[in-house]
Amino acid sequence: MENKELELGFQRILQGNKDWVDFVSKDTTGRFQQLAKGQNPEILWIGCADSRVPANEITGTKPGEVFVHRNIANMVIHADMSMLSVLDYAVNVLKIKQVIIAGHYGCGGVAAALSRQQFGIIDNWLCHIKDVYRIHAAEIDAIDEHEKKVDRLIELNVKEQVFNLCTTSIIQNAWKERNDLAVHGMVINIGTGELTDLNCTFTSNDDLGDVFAYK
């Protein structure tokens, strides 16, 4: 590469991998050899693509313990085939038991959705967050401080995405066959690392309402 900074950045990636390979080669637990044969995670994590919120570090889990899907602002959109494919594989093949939708304070996607500024093609994605604002506009507008408005919308967005996930046919059909599948909504404080439960857990479609709960 002609650009020295780019070259150094790429070399750091390669060196990081060499360090990881060295760590794996010295591990005596046998867990990496076991992982090479397959995965058996108990958790599906649907989180934000933000680089500051890695699932394993935040949950204190090891490789092989968390199946992950990430996008801008941890959205669950019913027409998103990438998310649905991950969900279907996690629920019906891996038989995961805990689904966590994890938002985080300081989410740029949610903050952008509260503005009138255009950002590009992502504006179409952010419209789904604007819909969450529309549902809860009275509550959000009653908050004076802008940062607190954003924080509250982050929490409400997680709760709406939990509901969206629970209304998928994938989750509801799994509930017909299993009683060991829970969907949770949580929010991360990046500054402290704390993961807070928003108390919006579902383990069946009983509380979704008649229009949303499949028979």
Image (cartoon, rainbow, N blue to C red):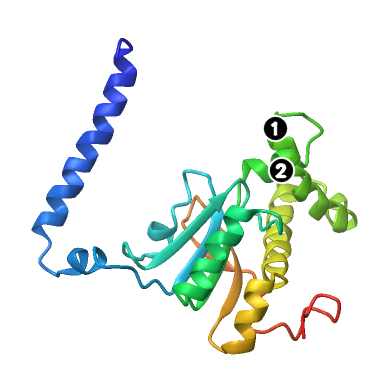
Mark 1–mark 2 distance (CA, rounded to whole Å): 8 Å
State the image quarter where residue 186 is shown.
bottom right
Q: Residue 3, how many percent across, how many down?
A: 33, 12
Rendering coords of residue 9 (x, y %): 31, 26
Residue shown at 46%/73% (left/top)? 93
Residue at 67%, 79% (x, y): give it. 172
Q: Label 2's element? A: helix
Residue type, label 2: Trp
- On the rendered structure, is 197 left or right of 61? right
Query: Which of the image's four quarters has the N terminus?
Result: top left
Q: Around disc 1, counting alpha carbons within 10 Å, would you say few (fewer than 14), some (14 to 19), or many (20 or more)? A: few
Rendering coords of residue 212 (x, y %) = 81, 75
Of 200 and 166, which appears nearest the observer? 166
Vertical placement of residue 65 versus 17, above or below: below
Viewer-nearest residue: 138 or 182: 182
Q: Quadrant of residue 4?
A: top left
- In the image: residue 39, left or right of residue 45: left
Question: Residue drawn at (85%, 58%), measured in percent from left and top?
Answer: 136
Quadrant showing the C terminus: bottom right
> Who is closer to the viewer here, 20 or 149?
20
Residue identifier under label 1 = 121
**Is disc 1 placed on a helix, strand or loop?**
loop
Residue 192 against residue 204 in the figure, above or below: above
Q: Are marks 1 and 2 in contact (CB under 8 Å)?
A: yes
Q: Is residue 77 above or below residue 213?
A: above
Tell which of 63 and 189 is nearer to you. 63
Number of numbered discs: 2
* Residue wearing tag 2: 125
Amino acid, disc 1: Ile
For residue 207, which quarter of the picture?
bottom right
- Does residue 202 appear in the picture of this structure? no
